[in-house]
C-alpha cells in the first residue's frame, strides 16, 4: 500500500505532538511536517505536496478556512481534514462547502484521527460521530432544496408540448401551426415556461429544452 503523507497545522504544540504520535503508530502514515500557523501551512503544502493536510480551524495569520480557500485557489493537490474545539453547525457546513473530506472535534481527535485519515485516503468522507446530527441536517436541507427546484413537472400539458417542439428547434410560428394555436399563445407559453423554470432568454429556454428532451417524450 502507498504511504499516505500528511502535514499537521495547529498552533498548539501539545496537540501536534499527540496527533503525530497517534498517526505514526500506523505504518502507512508519514507526517512530513508540523506547522503552527496558516501561512506556514500553505508553504509546507507547496513544498511537500502531502496527500492529506490536517488544519486547525483557529490558527494565527491565516485560519484553517483561509488556508482551504488558498488551497482551492492555487489548486494544490491535497485533501483537507479540519479540526476544531467548536461543536458548531455553521462551522461544519462551511468546512464541507470548502471541500473538506474530514471534520474532527479536538476532544475526540486522538481516537478519531486514524479512522478519519483512512477514510479520506480511501476517497471517503469522515465526521466525528458526535456530529452525525449535523450531517443529517445538511442532507435534509439538500433534499428540501432539491424538492423546491423548478422542474418540467411544474409545466402544464400544453407548456410541455411547446417545450418539446422548442427542443426540435421549431420557431414560434411553426409551433403555432403544428399545435393549431396563435403565435401570441405560443409566446405566452414560452414566457410562462421561462418564468416557471427560472430561465432567462430564448437561448436558455432552447438549451433547457434540448437537455431535457427525453423527459418530454
Image (tube, rainbow, N blue to C red):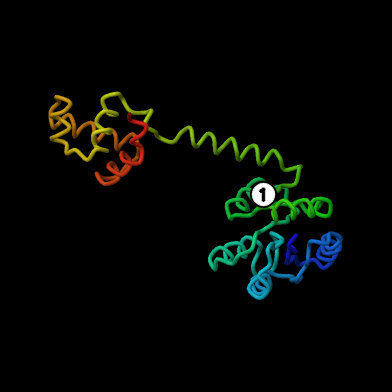
Q: Quarter of the image for the N terminus: give it.
A: bottom right
How many tags in the picture?
1
Classify 56 as above or below 105: below
In the displayed structure image, the side of residue 193 where residue 58 appears, left or right: right
In the displayed structure image, the side of residue 137 where residue 205 appears, left or right: left
- Please name the residue that numbered disc 1 is placed on: 124
Q: Residue at x 68, y 73 (%)?
A: 48
Report x, y in % for residue 39.
65, 72
Q: Residue at x 73, y 55 (%)?
A: 84
Q: Quarter of the image for the C terminus: give it.
A: top left
Report x, y in % for residue 30.
78, 66
Q: Residue at x 61, y 40 (%)?
A: 138
Classify 10 as above or below 152: below
For mark 1, does the 10 Å Cα neighbourhood hold few (<14), some (14 to 19), or many (20 or more) residues? few
Element at label 1: loop
In the displayed structure image, the side of residue 19 where residue 149 appears, left or right: left
Nearest the viewer among 35 and 212 is 212
Report x, y in % for residue 154.
37, 28
Amino acid at each position: 500500500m502507498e504511504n499516505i503523507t500528511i502535514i499537521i497545522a495547529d498552533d498548539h504544540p501539545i496537540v501536534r505532538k499527540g496527533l503525530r504520535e497517534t498517526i505514526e503508530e500506523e505504518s502507512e502514515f508519514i507526517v512530513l511536517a508540523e506547522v503552527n500557523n496558516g501561512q506556514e501551512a500553505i508553504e509546507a503544502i507547496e513544498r511537500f505536496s502531502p496527500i492529506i493536510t490536517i488544519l486547525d480551524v483557529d490558527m494565527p495569520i491565516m485560519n484553517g478556512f483561509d488556508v482551504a480557500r488558498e488551497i482551492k485557489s492555487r489548486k494544490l493537490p491535497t485533501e483537507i481534514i479540519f479540526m476544531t474545539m467548536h461543536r458548531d453547525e455553521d462551522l461544519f457546513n462551511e468546512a464541507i462547502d470548502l471541500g473538506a473530506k474530514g471534520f474532527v472535534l479536538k476532544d475526540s481527535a486522538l481516537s478519531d484521527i486514524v479512522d478519519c485519515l483512512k477514510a479520506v485516503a480511501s476517497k471517503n468522507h469522515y465526521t466525528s460521530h458526535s456530529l452525525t446530527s449535523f450531517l443529517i441536517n445538511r442532507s435534509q436541507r439538500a433534499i428540501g432544496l432539491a424538492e423546491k427546484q423548478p422542474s418540467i413537472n411544474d409545466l402544464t400539458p400544453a407548456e410541455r408540448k411547446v417545450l418539446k417542439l422548442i427542443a426540435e428547434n421549431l420557431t414560434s410560428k411553426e409551433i403555432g401551426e403544428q399545435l393549431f394555436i396563435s403565435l401570441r399563445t405560443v409566446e405566452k407559453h414560452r414566457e410562462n415556461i421561462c418564468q416557471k423554470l427560472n430561465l432567462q432568454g430564448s437561448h436558455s429556454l432552447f438549451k433547457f429544452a434540448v437537455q431535457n428532451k427525453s423527459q418530454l417524450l
